[in-house]
Amino acid sequence: MSLPHAPLVRAHGAAIPAIGLGTFNAHGEICSEAVSFALRNGYRHIDTAPRYENEEAVGEGLRRSGVPRDQIFLTTKVWWDRIGADDLQRSAEESLQKLGVDQVDLLLIHWPNPAIPLADSIAALNDAKRRGYAKHIGVSNFTIALLNEAWRLTQEPLVCNQCEWHPALDQEKLRAVVRGYGMIFTAYSPVGRGVYGENAVVSAIAKKYGKTASQVVLRWNVQHEGSVAIPKSVTPERIRANLDIFDFTLSAEEMAALSGLGSREGRLVKPDFSPAWD
């Protein structure tokens, strides 16, 4: 039996399921089956990117699931070295071909690139939407300064900023700016790559509700207003567990206790081309 669908989080005309399946480091048949299994078991939100080298496998999983395309929120991205004026559109076209779809629901700039003027990238992203490659557009790994500049430059609404976020990483300053623009904050690595299993605060809450540490952390994430999480898994039991978080609610005290674990030093994803984080 499939689980109930995740509630929708809305911004600028987009309606994004609060839990999606992340596919980073999933490839081939394993990726296709994970996507298909997730969709057959209640997921309606799938996240991929050219950098993951799995768009063909994701597309196969979409088709194999039997879930109608118009019921799935599909996100892909453009890698940071292809966000120039013409290259961004070519990347989007290639993604559509690999995924086997006419349009994605959300197209993101994957990472900012200081070597490419942001004005060029945002104009190209707007153009990709107008060409019909994506219903909605947004950004990923954008700092406060970059987000402010992107909004100054864009003519189309940016519906989300996708960034690393979990209890150990304090993102409140950035999240406040995202909320101020009416955007969704989409969390990747939302369970901190499984680092919370031995945390006493998380473990006590998990025991109280009969949930796993990851389920508690995911519930904390999506219980914040305007938040979406895209945990990655290829394990059927974990895929189902990551969606099974809408039958309990954390108290204000529990939310605060989990948020109290955060600091600026909790970041796990920090490639050498990262911007200067807030």
Image (cartoon, rainbow, N blue to C red):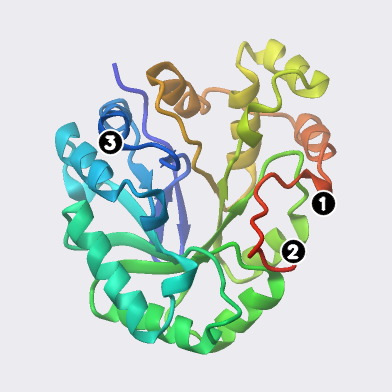
Q: CA distance from mark 1 to mark 3?
A: 35 Å
Q: Is residue 9 above or below residue 147?
A: above
Q: Residue at x 40, y 61 (%)?
A: 77
Q: Residue at x 83, y 36 (%)?
A: 261
Mark in the foreground, 1 or 3: 3
Q: Earlier in the sequence, mark 1 or mark 2?
A: 1
The C terminus sits in image quarter: bottom right
Assess whether mark 3 and mark 2 are in contact (beta carbons under 8 angstroms).
no
User: In the shown orientation, is residue 220 left or right of residue 60?
Assistant: right
Q: Earlier in the sequence, mark 1 or mark 3?
A: 3
Q: Is residue 110 above or below residue 23?
A: below
Local secondary structure at mark 2: loop
Residue 226 pos. (x, y %): 57, 53
Q: Amino acid at mark 3?
A: Gly
Local secondary structure at mark 3: helix
Res 83 seen here: yes
Q: Amino acid at mark 2?
A: Trp
Q: Amino acid at mark 1?
A: Arg
* Residue 277 tag number: 2
* Residue 117 tag number: none
Q: Camera-side residue: 231 or 185?
A: 231
Q: CA distance from mark 1 to mark 2?
A: 9 Å
Q: Camera-side residue: 193 or 244?
A: 193
Assess whether mark 2 and mark 1 are in contact (beta carbons under 8 angstroms).
yes
Residue 41 pos. (x, y %): 31, 25
Q: Residue at x 18, y 37 (%)?
A: 67
Q: CA distance from mark 2 to mark 3?
A: 34 Å
Assess whether mark 3 and mark 1 are in contact (beta carbons under 8 angstroms).
no
Q: Camera-side residue: 225 or 150?
A: 150
Q: Earlier in the sequence, mark 2 or mark 3?
A: 3
Give the residue number, with chain letter if any, for mark 1. 264
Give the residue number, with chain letter if any, for mark 3. 28
